[in-house]
Amino acid sequence: MQISMSSSPAQTLVSNFKSPLELKQAHAHLIKTNSPLSLIPPSRIASVCAVSLADISYAHRLLTHFSQPQIVVWNSCLKTFAESDSPFDAILLFRRLRELDVVPDSFTCAFVLKACTALLDDKNGKIIHGVIEKLGLHWNLVLQNMVLNFYGLCGEMSTARLVFDKMPQRDVVSWNVMITHLVKNGDFEGAYVLFSCMPERNVRSWTMMISACVHSGKPREGVELFMEMEKIGVQANEVTVVAVLSACADLGALELGKRVHEYSKRSGIRSNVRVSNTLIDMYVKCGCLEEARRVFEEMEERTVVSWSTMIQGLAIHGQAQEVLRVFSMMIEMGMMPNGVTFIGLLHACSHIGLVDEGRRFFSGMTRDYGIIPEIEHYGCMVDLYSRAGLLQEAHEFIMNMPIKPNGVIWGALLGGCKTHKNIELAEEATRHLARLDPLNDGYYVVLSNIYAEAERWIDAVRVRKLMKNRGVKKTIGCSSIMVDGVIHEFVAGDDSHSQAFEIFDMWEKLVNYMKLRGYKPDTSVVLLDVEEKEKEKFLYRHSEKLALCFGLINTPPGSVIRIMKNLRVCEDCHVAFKLISSIVNREIVVRDRNRFHCFKDGACSCQDYW
């Protein structure tokens, strides 16, 4: 005779036991009352016993009496463990189940592999891979993609590639996973080749490759990919927008950046804080400070990145007083600055000679905000002292730094030595630089230039010979300008351009106009022991001058000309561009290695040249 289970305590015990002991009590109760074992929820049997390896065999014996396949019940526990803070519990449970000859299925393998991936446990992951192969589950595409991702995350790229090549079938996820890990492991070329072979691509494929181009220093290729993506009708998402805006920022591709900005507005992506921050950065680096400001002011929510990006943008555009105003506003609104914020502040102080303010900001970083200065902040301080002519103070500051000075630190001092003609400290800085950054041509060139300006030609030649003996090659000046969506590049002395004749003719006309306004070629920047006429010829073929003439020929009157240069603009080009902006009544924006120069109405936005 079956006894009723209507009594509340017994029913509660059978359905809501919380430990193996209570389970055994419930089991005993069922036996004593001649009730069916099926009254106990099988999933609860597994979950209660799974946490104790000693009780798993007991649960296994109970579960054999249920019609439901046992592995289905255990899979629920494996999933819970794999997604918990202790994913190794899933691996331990799997081992015990294998000892009890419980046959796994595809879900079992997926959950345990997920645990191995979370732990980067290559040993157990390989065991699961072996189980997958042994069970003939290699046809399962989801599992194969998980295996591929596992090996990629563990850095075993040769194994990952072997898995990828042997996959009986692949989908877009397979290709994306393989390309992602190639990019993360620095194999951009391999990733690009694989991307080119993809039978189909989704927005993630395109975005991943565009982003890879940007991070690999190939922004032009990133822009080209985006244009190809647009052509075939793939809609960009917010991650794509951020990637392509970063490429536009690196290239100075303003028109495309504006178009992407418009797209982000239409699609609703514009409200995304990360997109807005990238837009500010793009406009800053394309020389459109007012547009950057407009994006910043229209933001409903601003993060510390928003404020810091705006502050840095103002700083590299020479708007030091505006930097201080925006920082004050930031503090008033309760936004805590970070290390990047102070780099912008110190940079601004450096460029207008606010030595005392720079000192206060530097000391206040730690005192007021708990920010420990990093090497970049020390570099800004050395730059601040060096620009102000406080070379001995800059040197003492370096010698007392709590962290080891790097090449940037000594390079900042060297730059100050050139401006203020201190040969002795320049030689000391160069000795350190030769050890810290032996293949950086810029430092040798600066020392050579310092000697040449002092007419110490033997020393200048000695430095140039030293460069040659050490295999250091001088970086050739290169400038680019975008016209009608096409980037045109010019190198110093270039006469191979299809419009070379028109460019040189335009320059001759400009020189004549400039000389009427008192222009004299500053041949001191041509540090070669040659005749004056030869020096002028070298001077007139600087890459930014060629790019400017090309822009004047090929852009509408009154439009802004934007030029990017890989090196610093020289003193002669700086003077010439100020005059030309007034002669042609055009705004000329030049982004060089250090900062932006906005030439307009005969003046430059930067208060100092260096």
Image (cartoon, grey):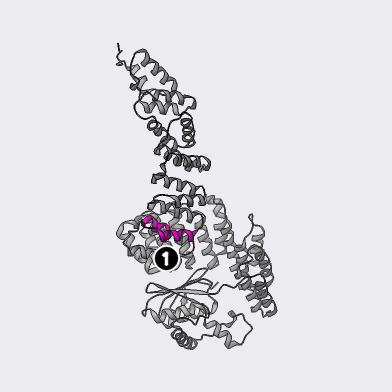
User: Residue at image x 61%, y 87%?
Assistant: 531
Task: Answer left or right for 257 relative to 384.
Answer: left
User: Residue at image x 51%, y 85%?
Assistant: 519
Specify the amino acid type for callout 1: Cys
User: Helix, strand or loop at disc 1?
Assistant: helix
Q: Is residue 2 above or below residue 304?
A: above
Task: Answer left or right for 429 relative to 90.
Answer: right
Q: Is residue 591 above or below residue 192?
A: below
Is residue 198 or residue 121 the one in the foreground?
A: 198
Asked if residue 295 can be seen in this view, the reply is: yes
User: Residue at image x 39%, y 80%?
Assistant: 554
Where is the C terminus found, in terms of image quarters? bottom right
Q: Is residue 499 above or below residue 380?
A: below
Residue 538: name its quadrant: bottom right
Residue underneath mark 1:
248
Secondary structure, magenta segment, majority class: helix
Q: Is residue 146 magenta?
A: no
Magenta residues, as a range? 187-212
Is residue 563 or residue 218 the one in the foreground?
A: 218
Where is the N terminus found, in terms of image quarters? top left
Give the total number of marks visible in the rendering. 1
Is residue 269 or residue 271 the one in the foreground?
A: 269
Is residue 591 or residue 24 the one in the foreground?
A: 24
Position of residue 110 measured from the top left corner of the image (x, y, whole percent): 42, 40
Position of residue 60 measured from the top left corner of the image (x, y, whole percent): 43, 25
Position of residue 494 measured from the top left corner of the image (x, y, whole percent): 51, 80
Q: Which residue lies most toward the top here? A: 1
Q: Is residue 489 above or below residue 175?
A: below
Position of residue 23 measured from the top left corner of the image (x, y, whole percent): 41, 21
